[in-house]
């Protein structure tokens, strides 16, 4: 489903974010990409979202070269992907409800359907009472849960999660990981970028370890080694 | 499609309400820009009035031979009145000319004595012709000199006054061109200021725009609310400027008329209200939409 072929990403001569990285992710797989900060995890996710392009190599999504997708078709690619960003990327002028509903509005879903889905998802992430709050009125953990709700609402083919539990307490962390596992069971491919050792080791799923932009380990039932 | 348009509209309106300070700043600058355009509109009116006034001071007189018949002169007068280039034709008979001369120079004993000595009325009958525009005199004079009544015409004073008439024409033209050029420059500056204000407003939303693109919104779904905001602010600014203009004109009408006798700005305002509203609305809405379209382009490349 997703294929990174000989990907190199260089920001400037002194910053090589990814160095000849290659791996594939099959449909319904749950993959954790681990490594220290600056290892290149977020860069991989940006390349898949066509937010940036590789310096060398190609990224394929459902058989299509992401770099060759024409400008007006990129939104269609992104609607198949749910993304949880490290810095949340919530719309500051919209309420929590409106942030989550936005992707469904973009896809043309009816108002009744949006209301039903958003209410359900906000319940799942435990923010039923904060639907009318703006992001600046929410705590870091609450913002992260809104971001998670937005990534899940449209039942994407692929879910990219970049440090989704970074600001959460252990209770919410466990809940969110369980939600990701549940979504994966229902058929969504999940790529989780994290440096949380406990989460990775508890999952017993495939782990790809990055260090200095290179893949140093790729194990089916991997663990996070320091 | 309709649902999408409705969503875009609601999103634009909601964001406008929530970003009140920024919206007000943009609104204020738009009001300034549209007000300047409005002032230039009235200045053009005043300039045209001045030019017309100046040109109306110019006229020509056609003098007829002593033995010409009054009915022939009156026939010519009727013909001239039908000419669309001519605004008025005044017939002055020999007797009227004499009376006017005596009235004008009654305090000049030398002239009055000379007149008395002559015995006979030396003055000629004439037609005083005023054209709508000074540029038309040449053609009028040509048709008189070559027309059916050329035999009864003694002289036309156009040739003596041609230089002055041309100078008046020249000055009128220069005033008009200067007025237009100044209007264009000032108008452009006003629009540029308003455009940059809108650009700054959109710059402050650049991150929001990139987030919308990253979650899968199309360019038009992102653009739409900003265009709506630009439109609403532009229309509101135009309406506000119209109200302010109306109140200002009502207050200043008599003062302006004392400064420019004959130019009733309230009457000019009433006659041109439709065009003024059109100019204000199209400036406001057009500026709002076009500025938003141009300003947002850069941030859609995500």
Image (cartoon, coloured by chain):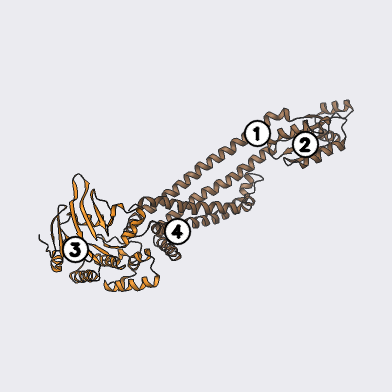
Residue at mark 4: B228
Identify the residue position indicated by label 3 in the image.
Answer: A31
How much space separates mark 2 and mark 4, taking CA atoms? 60 Å
**Viewer-proximal residue among B74 and A73:** A73
Q: Which residue, as the protein is rendered here, is positioned at the far right? A: B119
Which residue is nearer to you in this view: A38 or B217? B217
Give the camera-side residue of A148 and B100. Answer: A148
Other residues around mark 3 within 10 Å, as few (<14) / some (14–19) / many (≥20): many
Q: Name the residue under label 2.
A: B128
Q: In the image, A26: left or right of B6?
A: left
Mark 2 or 4: the one toward you: 4
Chain letter of disc 3 in the image = A
Q: Nearer the viewer, mark 3 or mark 4?
A: 3
Residues at badges 2 and 4 in contact (C-beta under 8 Å)? Answer: no
SS category of the residue bearing label 3: strand
Q: Which element carries disc 2, helix, strand or loop? A: strand
């Amino acid at each position: 489903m997703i294929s990174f072929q000989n990907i190199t990403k260089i920001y400037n001569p002194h910053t090589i974010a990814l160095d000849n990285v290659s791996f594939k992710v099959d449909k319904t797989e749950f993959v954790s990409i681990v490594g220290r900060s600056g290892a290149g995890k977020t860069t991989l996710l940006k390349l898949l979202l066509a937010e940036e392009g590789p310096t060398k190599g190609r990224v394929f999504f459902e058989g299509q070269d992401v770099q060759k997708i024409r400008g007006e078709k990129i939104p269609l690619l992104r609607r198949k992907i749910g993304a949880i960003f490290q810095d949340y990327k919530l719309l500051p002028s919209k309420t929590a409800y409106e942030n989550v509903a936005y992707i469904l509005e973009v896809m043309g879903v009816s108002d009744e359907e949006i209301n039903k889905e958003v209410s359900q998802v906000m319940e799942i992430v435990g923010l039923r009472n904060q639907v009318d709050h703006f992001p600046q009125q929410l705590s870091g953990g609450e913002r992260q849960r809104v971001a998670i709700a937005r990534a899940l609402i449209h039942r994407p083919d692929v879910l990219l999660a970049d440090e989704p539990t970074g600001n959460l307490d252990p209770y919410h962390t466990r809940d969110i990981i369980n939600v990701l596992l549940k979504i994966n069971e229902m058929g969504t491919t999940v790529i989780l970028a994290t440096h949380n050792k406990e989460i990775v080791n508890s999952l017993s799923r495939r782990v790809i370890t990055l260090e200095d932009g290179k893949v140093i380990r790729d194990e089916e039932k991997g663990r996070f080694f320091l | 499609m309709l649902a999408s348009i409705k969503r875009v509209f609601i999103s634009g309106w909601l964001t406008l309400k929530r970003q009140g300070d920024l919206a007000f700043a943009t609104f204020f600058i738009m009001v300034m820009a549209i007000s300047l355009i409005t002032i230039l509109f009235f200045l053009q009116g005043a300039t045209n009035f001045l030019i017309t006034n100046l040109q109306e001071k110019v006229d020509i007189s056609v003098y007829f031979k002593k033995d010409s018949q009054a009915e022939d002169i009156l026939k010519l007068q009727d013909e001239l009145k039908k000419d669309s280039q001519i605004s008025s034709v005044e017939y002055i008979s020999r007797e009227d000319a004499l009376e006017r001369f005596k009235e004008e120079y009654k305090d000049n004993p030398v002239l009055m004595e000379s007149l008395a000595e002559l015995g006979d009325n030396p003055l000629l009958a004439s037609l005083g012709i005023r054209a709508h525009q000074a540029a038309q005199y040449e053609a009028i004079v040509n048709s008189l000199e070559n027309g059916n009544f050329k035999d009864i015409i003694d002289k036309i004073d156009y040739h003596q006054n041609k230089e002055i008439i041309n100078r008046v024409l020249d000055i009128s033209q220069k005033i008009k061109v200067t007025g237009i050029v100044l209007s264009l420059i000032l108008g452009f500056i006003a629009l540029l200021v308003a455009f940059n204000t809108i650009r700054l407003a959109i710059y402050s939303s650049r991150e929001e725009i990139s987030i919308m693109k990253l979650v899968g919104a199309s360019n038009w779904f992102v653009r739409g609310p900003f265009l709506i905001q630009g439109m609403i602010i532009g229309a509101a600014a135009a309406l506000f400027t119209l109200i302010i203009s109306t109140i200002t004109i009502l207050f200043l009408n008599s003062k302006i008329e004392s400064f420019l006798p004959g130019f009733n700005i309230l009457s000019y305002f009433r006659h041109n209200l439709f065009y003024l509203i059109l100019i204000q609305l199209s400036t406001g809405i057009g500026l709002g939409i076009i500025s938003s379209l141009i300003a947002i382009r850069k941030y859609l490349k995500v």
